[in-house]
Image: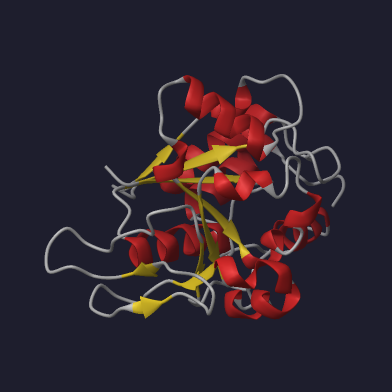
Amino acid sequence: MRVGYYGGTFDPIHVGHLDVARAAQHALDLDRVYFVPAEQPPHRSKPRASAAHRFAMAALAIAAAPRFALSDLEMRGGGPSYTSATLDRLAASGVDTRACVLITGADAFQDIPSWKDFPAILDRCHMAVVSRPDRPAPALRFTLPSLAVRMIDAPAGASRMIDAPAGASRMIDAPAAGGTRLPATPGILLVDAPTAPVSSTDIRRRLAAREDIGGLVPAAVEEYIEKHGLYVEQA
């Protein structure tokens, strides 16, 4: 089974998050994508909603998606939800992390030099980096030139071959059966697909200002936020 893990604060989860997960799932033919809400994100201030509320909203958001699932992997640590620590937990449970795909948006990935255990973390798993508004994934070759040799354009479908950048000997191809083949060694897979121009920050601002958020989050999430009075006091 080919599995992806999509970590984030999800404060709250929104349609842009779902677009990122769908784009990675489609481009890499992932059998399952696990959403992994962070209990305590390491690179930002304390979330506005509790870990329990954010976990519940993520569950509601993906309930109707057959290839999406929810993981409490980062709810058990009791400290900052570092990606390297998540990989440690996966490895300890018997998962071959080098066969896994960690999913992230291009806006988050551009800060990877500040992540704990960089650059060693890039040798532990594949990274699927999906375009976000004003942050196209292919542009990361210029934003992070030292990593460009490790970056590979993920195919838009399952019928074309993509050569790795100069200096790399890897490729993603599409065999007649079995779906898209991942590189033999961990790679940075760039997925250039449209994703909704939505941010959790803007949603929180709208809610604090008593503005409508219809269409920005799944309907079930909007109902949950209203029911529990989340985000109404501060953005």
Residue 164 against residue 38 in the figure, above or below: below
Task: Please give the name of the residue rendered at 50% of the width and 70% of the height, measured from the top-left corner.
Answer: 168
- Asked whether, in this view, residue 11 is left or right of residue 20, the answer is right
Residue 66: x %, y % from top left: 28, 47
Q: Residue at position x 60%, y 38% from top? A: 37
Front residue of 214/28: it is 28
Left/right placement of residue 73 relative to residue 226 reads left
Which percent across, then down, holds residue 111? Answer: 77, 59
Is 147 situated above or below 135?
Answer: above
Quadrant in the rendering for residue 76: top right
Give x and y (percent) for residue 151: 55, 69
Foreground of the two, 87 or 71 = 87
Q: Position of residue 166 (x, y in %)?
A: 53, 79
In this rendered view, identify the residue nearer to me: 212 or 101.
101
Quarter holding the N terminus is top left
**Is residue 218 in sight in this rendering?**
yes
Number of numbered discs visible in the structure rendering? 0
Q: Residue furthest left?
A: 177
Q: Residue at x 76, y 30 (%)?
A: 80
Image quadrant in which you'd find residue 70: top left
Residue at 79%, 40% in the rendered image: 48
